């Protein structure tokens, strides 16, 4: 069924007219004119404060944006997702990561299966297993407790658990070291295997499909490494699997008693809440993992219950569309001011770009609006000393999501005040900039000669008026992390609905999975010098020589 293009909706037209006026607004002036701007443009829910006041918006802008959300049917689509309707139309699948964090009391039937019951049955198995590993009851082949857990997976089967295990570092069991191997590059596995001992290692092979080339190759190589000093009979104590594909797990040689299942209605990049989160439960304990799920559930409730005008994921999505489709921003930078969130930007890259990196609408028609911006970033304050120059004075305007936690989890005096001061100061500077008059006054106070002042003026002036969001939590805990990730998931969902795309398929990546196959066979088998362009043919020839060694 054809759907109306975003640009054809009355709300979009109204926003275009509004933009003609909004494009010249100065945020400095908007703040000066309204002392209540922060309270007007901030929302608190699920342990998070979302301050979106440093964007070029007024009440009128927000009314028009919310009207757009209503016109695009955000509420209906949201309800359809939560109800288990097959909204992933190109793969004929439901999208039910929200069911993974809902309490056991609910009932949700999809294709005749009580999803809720199945979810909680697996969670109970995860609890039992993680308790045994953490308490030291689960013993390796020489009766020693596990000390190192190696997750082998890629994409959604790697990024979520790694990001969360890092973010929750203070909660990790002191005996357990967590490792993550994802790359087809053997150096990744090699580096980890040098740090672990076959007597005390537990490999978690994580793959929704259990066919992904990188993961299968790493798992096979890990298995061969293990069997150098061990017997086949030792494998069950050191290898477990997480997958939707029982047959492939069995074929690989992992006992299906040691397999934690999930379901095709869980997208790879939304799978951290499923058995894919097992490394998080192993590292931090099942109770902490439950708190992580509960934090996400709190955000789900907010997303379902709050009116659109005060709905954090909806407002965040609308602000994103305002910046992307009207102000023309092409990327968004993620700036968590917390070292333990140093994998968040990478995690969000997959969540956002694999979901909304699309060029046709759900009905197949080409879109006439830009979709997902490029997502990138790093922790503050490190980013400040790398690329913030461009954010302040570069020719592109890049909106930033600042993320801060008020309470540190260390007791080094002074650090946290410096960290937060930097975070808030950068956001303020992006908004306010520094005018030529302010620069003159500052330089005169330093007795700089007038000629020097005038020469340096253009370089030391900051345009400001650059948008950012600020997300603040009291502390980075399993619950606030869960809420934060769910916030981004729902933001991505709402933007997908606004743009009219399917956020839940990834045909481009599936294409990538087959691309290398023919070249791989030429590198190790018979080359075909006519098969490719001259550049690719020459590169293959070079690599063949090197591989033959
Ligand atoms: O990168 C493509 C993708 O399909 C992701 O969506 C997924 O998270 C990743 O591959 C890994 O897939 P699997 O869990 O099946 O190994």
Image (cartoon, grey):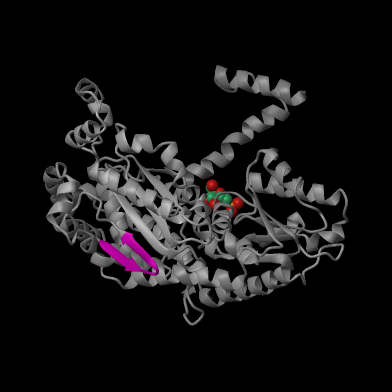
Q: Is residue 94 visible?
A: no
Q: Would you place residue 82 above or below residue 20 in this image?
A: below
Magenta stretch, main secondary structure, is strand
- 210 to the left or right of 37: right
Q: Which residues are magenta?
A: 42-50
Q: Is residue 40 visible?
A: yes
Q: Residue at x 77, y 24 (%)?
A: 548
- 195 to the left or right of 106: right
Q: Residue at x 67, y 19 (%)?
A: 542
Q: What is the quadrant of residue 443 in the picture? A: top left
Picture coordinates of residue 145, whole percent (x, y): 79, 65
| Number of marks present in the image shown | 0
Picture coordinates of residue 66, whole percent (x, y): 21, 60
Looking at the picture, tell me which residue is in the foreground, 431 or 316: 431
Q: Residue at x 83, y 57 (%)?
A: 199
Say which quadrant the N terminus sits in. bottom left
- 38 to the left or right of 225: left
Say which quadrant the C terminus sits in. top right
Is 295 magenta? The answer is: no
Q: Would you place residue 242 above or below residue 180 in this image?
A: below
Picture coordinates of residue 333, whole percent (x, y): 39, 44
Q: What is the quadrant of residue 493 in the picture? A: bottom left
Picture coordinates of residue 253, whole percent (x, y): 77, 57
Looking at the picture, tell me which residue is in the foreground, 135 or 132: 135
């Amino acid at each position: 069924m054809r759907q109306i293009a975003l640009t054809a909706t009355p709300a979009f037209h109204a926003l275009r007219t509004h933009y003609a006026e909004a494009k010249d607004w100065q945020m400095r002036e908007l703040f000066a004119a309204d002392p209540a701007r922060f309270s007007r443009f901030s929302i608190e829910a699920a342990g998070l404060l979302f301050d979106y006041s440093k964007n070029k918006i007024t009440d009128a802008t927000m009314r028009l944006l919310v009207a757009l959300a209503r016109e695009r049917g955000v509420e209906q689509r949201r309800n359809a997702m939560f109800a288990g309707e097959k909204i992933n139309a190109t793969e004929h699948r439901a999208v039910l990561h929200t069911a993974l964090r809902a309490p056991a009391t609910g009932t949700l039937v999809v294709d005749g299966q009580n999803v809720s019951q199945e979810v909680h049955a697996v969670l109970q198995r995860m609890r039992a297993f993680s308790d045994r590993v953490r308490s030291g009851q689960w013993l390796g082949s020489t009766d020693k407790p596990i000390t190192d857990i190696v997750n082998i997976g890629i994409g959604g089967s790697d990024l979520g658990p790694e990001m969360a295990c890092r973010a929750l570092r203070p909660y990790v069991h002191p005996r357990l070291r967590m490792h993550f191997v994802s790359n087809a590059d053997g150096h990744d596995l090699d580096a980890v295997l040098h740090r672990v001992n076959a007597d005390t290692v537990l490999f978690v092979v994580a793959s929704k499909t259990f066919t992904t080339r990188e993961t299968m190759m790493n798992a096979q190589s890990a298995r061969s490494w293990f069997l150098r000093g061990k017997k086949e009979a030792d494998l069950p104590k050191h290898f477990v699997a997480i997958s939707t594909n029982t047959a492939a797990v069995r074929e690989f040689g992992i006992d299906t008693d040691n397999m934690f299942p999930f379901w095709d209605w869980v997208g790879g990049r939304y799978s951290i809440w499923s058995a894919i989160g097992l490394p998080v439960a192993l590292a931090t304990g099942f109770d902490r993992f439950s708190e992580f799920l509960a934090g996400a559930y709190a955000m789900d409730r907010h997303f379902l219950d709050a009116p659109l005008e005060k709905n954090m994921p909806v407002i965040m999505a609308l602000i994103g569309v305002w910046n992307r489709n009207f102000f023309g921003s092409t990327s968004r930078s993620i700036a968590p001011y917390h070292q333990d969130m140093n994998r968040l930007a990478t995690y969000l890259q997959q969540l956002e770009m694999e979901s909304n990196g699309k060029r046709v609408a759900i009905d197949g028609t080409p879109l006439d609006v830009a979709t997902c911006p490029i997502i990138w970033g790093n922790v503050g304050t490190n980013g400040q000393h790398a690329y913030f120059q461009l954010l302040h004075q570069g020719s592109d305007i890049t909106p930033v999501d600042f993320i801060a936690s008020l309470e540190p989890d260390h007791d080094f005096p002074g650090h946290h005040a410096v960290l937060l001061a930097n975070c808030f100061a950068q956001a303020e500077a992006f908004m306010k900039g520094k005018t030529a008059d302010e620069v003159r006054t500052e330089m005169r106070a330093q007795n700089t000669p007038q000629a020097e002042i005038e020469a340096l003026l253009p370089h030391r002036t900051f345009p400001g008026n650059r948008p950012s969001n600020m997300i603040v939590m009291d502390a980075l805990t399993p619950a606030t992390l869960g809420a934060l990730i769910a916030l981004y998931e729902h933001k991505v969902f709402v933007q997908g609905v606004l743009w009219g795309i399917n956020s839940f398929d990834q045909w481009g990546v599936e294409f990538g999975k087959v691309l290398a196959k023919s070249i791989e066979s030429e590198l190790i088998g018979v080359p075909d010098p006519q098969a490719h362009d001259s550049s690719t043919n020459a590169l293959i020839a070079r690599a063949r020589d090197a591989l033959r060694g």
